């Protein structure tokens, strides 16, 4: 396996947290849009 | 369609096909044909993964879905980032470690040949059917809109895909997908911008968002739970995660995309790229649909968006009736205009009472409008027996053809064809890999030289393309196209994922238990589809299939051990 450290954060855990945080933020923002505009 | 549109359309398509064929020429071994050169960087993998998933159906159907059902379809994608993380942590390192060509090879290492073959066969059935739909969907809509024969459209897409996929294999798929995705994003971005600029000058961007929200189209997150409800936050976070775990983790059309990476790091980053960008991309496509919805609040929409079928019905015998319905539809639109103007005024003045009255008036007009639409559909069905009267998939393309400037029309049609070709090429490449590696090389002829398998892979690519084209020419689907693709996936993905989950996490379970559990689970899922279609939304088939494989295999293994002890 050609495993290297990931770019930018140098930690896979940090990347995974970013992906999940981005998803959660989007869900919250979309929920707010739904509530505000309907 | 003007000469400029034809030039843009065919220039784009031929340019991508010729460039992809030239750039990927010289695949001399089976490994380079099926895996590419394994030199892909993370962003190339990410683009390739997104291009494989986003077929023409995505761009034809999704805006129409937003117009009719609002934006809640986006919840379907909420499970995707979670699936990307799980696959990056668990499945991807194993595939890299074992240096597999296909995901199913791993199952023989873990279980036995019959389990590997079962999973490969389920994939071949599922992906073979999907390849047909991938081709059928754009062929049907584009043939109707352009007035082409569906056989010609199917052949055009199929032959173009065969040229570069057979010539360059997996590498050609990845190269062409980069340019196809560029065309798709540029085209859709331009369409969104044009839809907004076509709105009346007194309607700001915020006004259009508010109007859409008041009329129920910004229902992005819905929290009510019902087993029969297809799209809500619960089905999105739970059932979709299972669907995407199976699709990205075990479907060879996706596994091949990230196994073509330069390293495990690049492949992981490619999945992360997809996890970050997929939901925003779908949001934009749905939002374009919302803008088109707002556009049609201020501009007279047709009573039926499949204009070619409407004209045929008029010529058949329903001309007088349809003309009458069209006149009623125009009159109702005038009434609806009063409601919309009142709504905009209420929004500008922040007058809640005015907004409430306007909405009441709007929905009353809409009920009449819907009734006229249904009567028109009935008239068409009577005039042309067997005609497909679901026109949701035609709304966006009809808007493009009637309201966007020349050149942009050609570009948007190139978007649809590019999307069809990008998905289909991945699917054909994956079908050929699985047929060659998991069936032909493993079961039928194991002792041939590499060049023999290279030639076989190319022939299998052509064979699957011909089957997909045949299926597309014979198919006739009643459902909205994007939903049909997901329904077919959900019928098989749960079982396949269950097999892989047991392989990864339940070391206690051996081959016989998982094999019989998988067969039972697949039977139950098919029974759910045929007997409880209305009661259980299709996304839950993924949980049912997967859960059954895991539970039943554990029980069967326990029984087997007990029997051995006795």
Image (cartoon, coloured by chain):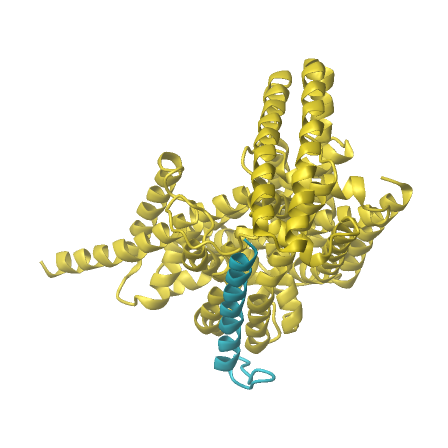
Where's the C terminus of chain B, which quadrant?
A: bottom left
The picture quadrant where one finds residue B27 is bottom right
In this view, the residue farthest toward the left is B566
Q: Provide residue B234's location: percent of width, then percent of height.
A: 41, 56
Q: Check the image and report above or below for B521 versus B559.
A: above
The picture quadrant where one finds residue B308 is top right
Residue B287 can be seen, yes or no = no
Where's the N terminus of chain B, which quadrant?
A: top right
The picture quadrant where one finds residue B453 is bottom right
| Left or right, B529 with reference to B312 | left
| Left or right, B103 with reference to B500 | right
Q: Provide residue B30's location: percent of width, then percent of height.
A: 62, 61
Which is more toward the observer, B39 or B291?
A: B291
| Left or right, B347 with reference to B443 | right
Q: Provide residue B261's location: percent of width, then percent of height.
A: 61, 71
Q: Check the image and report above or below for A21 versus B462.
A: below
The hue in which chain A appears in the rendered picture of the protein: cyan
Number of numbered discs on residues:
0
The hue in which chain B appears in the rendered picture of the protein: yellow
Residue at image location 74% in from the left, 17% down from the top: B315
Which is more toward the observer, B194 or A33?
A: A33
Residue at image location 49% in from the left, 44% down from the top: B488
Residue B86 can be seen, yes or no = yes
Q: Provide residue B60's location: percent of width, then percent of height.
A: 66, 45
């Amino acid at each position: 396996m050609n495993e290297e450290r990931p770019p930018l954060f140098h930690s896979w855990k940090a990347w995974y947290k970013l992906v999940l945080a981005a998803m959660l933020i989007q869900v919250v923002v979309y929920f707010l849009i739904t509530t505000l505009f309907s | 369609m003007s000469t400029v549109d034809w030039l843009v359309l065919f220039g784009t398509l031929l340019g991508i096909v010729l460039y992809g064929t030239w750039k990927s020429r010289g695949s001399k071994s089976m490994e380079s044909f099926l895996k590419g050169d394994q030199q892909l960087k993370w962003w190339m993998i990410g683009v390739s993964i997104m291009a494989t998933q986003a077929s023409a159906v995505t761009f034809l159907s999704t805006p129409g879905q937003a117009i009719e059902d609002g934006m809640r379809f986006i919840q379907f994608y909420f499970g995707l980032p979670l699936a990307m993380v799980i696959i990056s942590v668990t499945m991807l390192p194993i595939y890299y470690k074992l240096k597999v060509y296909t995901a199913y090879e791993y199952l023989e290492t873990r279980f036995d040949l019959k389990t590997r073959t079962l999973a490969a066969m389920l994939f071949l059935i599922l992906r073979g059917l999907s390849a047909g739909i991938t081709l059928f969907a754009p062929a049907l809509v584009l043939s109707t809109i352009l007035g082409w024969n569906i056989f010609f459209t199917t052949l055009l897409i199929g032959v173009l895909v065969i040229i570069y996929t057979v010539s360059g294999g997996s590498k050609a798929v990845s190269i062409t997908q980069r340019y196809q995705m560029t065309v798709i994003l540029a085209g859709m971005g331009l369409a969104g911008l044009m839809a907004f600029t076509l709105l009346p000058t007194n309607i700001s961007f915020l006004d259009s968002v508010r109007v859409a929200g008041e009329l129920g189209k910004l229902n992005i997150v819905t929290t009510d739970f019902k087993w029969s409800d297809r799209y809500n936050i619960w089905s999105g976070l739970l059932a979709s995660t299972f669907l995407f775990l199976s699709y990205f983790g075990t479907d060879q059309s996706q596994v091949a995309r990230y196994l073509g990476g330069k390293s495990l790091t690049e492949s992981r980053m490619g999945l992360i790229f997809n996890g970050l960008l997929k939901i925003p991309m779908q949001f934009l496509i749905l939002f374009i649909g919302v803008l088109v919805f707002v556009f049609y609040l201020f501009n007279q929409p047709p009573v039926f968006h499949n204009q070619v079928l409407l004209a045929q019905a008029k010529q058949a015998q329903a001309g007088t009736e349809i003309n009458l319905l069209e006149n009623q539809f125009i009159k109702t639109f005038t009434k609806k205009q009063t409601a919309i103007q009142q709504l905009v005024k209420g929004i500008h003045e922040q007058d809640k009472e005015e907004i409430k009255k306007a909405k009441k008036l709007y929905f009353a007009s809409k009920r009449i409008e819907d009734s006229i639409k249904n009567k028109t559909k009935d008239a068409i069905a009577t005039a042309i027996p067997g005609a497909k009267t679901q026109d949701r998939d035609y709304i966006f393309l009809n808007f493009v053809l009637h309201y966007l400037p020349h050149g942009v029309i050609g570009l948007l049609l190139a978007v649809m064809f590019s999307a069809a070709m990008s998905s289909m090429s991945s699917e054909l490449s994956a079908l050929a890999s699985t047929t060659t590696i998991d069936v032909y090389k493993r079961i039928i002829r194991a002792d041939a030289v590499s060049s023999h398998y290279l030639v076989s892979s190319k022939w299998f690519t052509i064979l699957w393309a011909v089957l997909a084209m045949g299926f597309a020419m014979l198919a006739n689907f009643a459902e909205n196209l994007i939903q049909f693709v997901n329904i077919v996936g959900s019928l098989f993905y749960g079982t396949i994922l269950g097999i892989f989950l047991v392989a990864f996490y339940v070391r206690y379970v051996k081959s016989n238990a998982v094999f019989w559990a998988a067969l039972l689970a697949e039977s139950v899922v098919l029974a759910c589809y045929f007997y409880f279609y209305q009661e259980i939304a299709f996304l839950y088939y993924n949980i049912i299939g997967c859960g059954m494989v895991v539970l039943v295999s554990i029980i069967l293994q326990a029984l087997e051990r007990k029997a051995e002890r006795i």
